Image (spheres, rainbow, N blue to C red):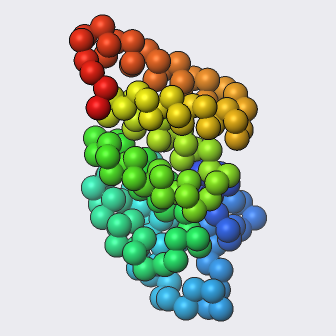
């Protein structure tokens, strides 16, 4: 386990002193502590994704683990899977993962930003506007959101100048 701070904030119910996902114990999670466990799988997937860029292996690992646990125990796995899908160009899958993460944990503003990015990638600008409005209502305008919204608006402007239509 790393002493570094885990890169995804606010998504986990069980954390160690460094902010990394921690096993909740046998009372909550009676499964084995191997790659079938979403915590073990997510740690390994995060390492593969962030340090090695091995997106497909990380994606496969997470997809196998996610189906084994109740969603409410581990929404961050959905968020990480959304990020991996986004990097791989699977925008609809990424959007679905971000929605799942946000549906499970309404404090996961990163999932809303992920939804904004995927909406722009899919040229769903009406959906992106709804996400922007919701984000501001829920969390206010922070730097993270403002920078993402600026990129989204640039994408929208470019797309419309090309004669594109919303999906």
Q: Quadrant of the N terminus?
A: bottom right
The quarter of the displayed image where residue 34 is located: bottom left
* 38 or 67: nearer the viewer: 67
Residue 11 % position (x, y): 62, 58
Q: Residue at x 27, y 21 (%)?
A: 165
Question: In the picture shown, does residue 44 fall above or below 88?
Answer: below
Question: In the picture shown, does residue 132 fall above or below 35?
Answer: above
Q: Residue at x 69, y 59 (%)?
A: 19
Query: Of all residues shown, which one is farthest toward the left?
Result: 163
Q: Residue at x 62, y 50 (%)?
A: 108
* 129 or 79: nearer the viewer: 129
Q: Is residue 78 left or right of residue 146?
A: left
Q: Residue at x 24, y 12 (%)?
A: 163
* 48 or 82: nearer the viewer: 82
Residue 75 % position (x, y): 55, 63
Residue 5 % position (x, y): 66, 52
Q: Is residue 149 left or right of residue 13?
A: left
Q: Is residue 4 visible?
A: no
């Amino acid at each position: 386990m790393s002493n570094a701070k885990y890169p995804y904030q606010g998504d986990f119910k069980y954390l160690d002193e460094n902010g990394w996902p921690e096993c909740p114990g046998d009372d909550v999670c009676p499964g084995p502590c191997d790659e079938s466990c979403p915590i073990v799988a997510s740690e390994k997937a995060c390492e593969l994704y962030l340090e090695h860029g091995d997106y497909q292996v990380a994606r496969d690992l997470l997809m196998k683990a996610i189906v084994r646990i109740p969603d409410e125990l581990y929404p961050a796995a959905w968020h990480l899977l959304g990020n991996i899908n986004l990097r791989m160009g699977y925008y609809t899958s990424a959007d679905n993962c971000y929605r799942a993460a946000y549906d499970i944990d309404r404090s996961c503003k990163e999932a809303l930003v992920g939804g904004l990015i995927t909406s722009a990638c899919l040229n769903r600008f009406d959906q992106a506007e709804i996400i922007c409005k919701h984000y501001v209502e829920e969390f206010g305008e922070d730097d993270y959101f403002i920078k993402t919204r600026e990129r989204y608006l640039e994408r929208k402007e470019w797309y419309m100048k090309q004669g594109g239509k919303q999906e």
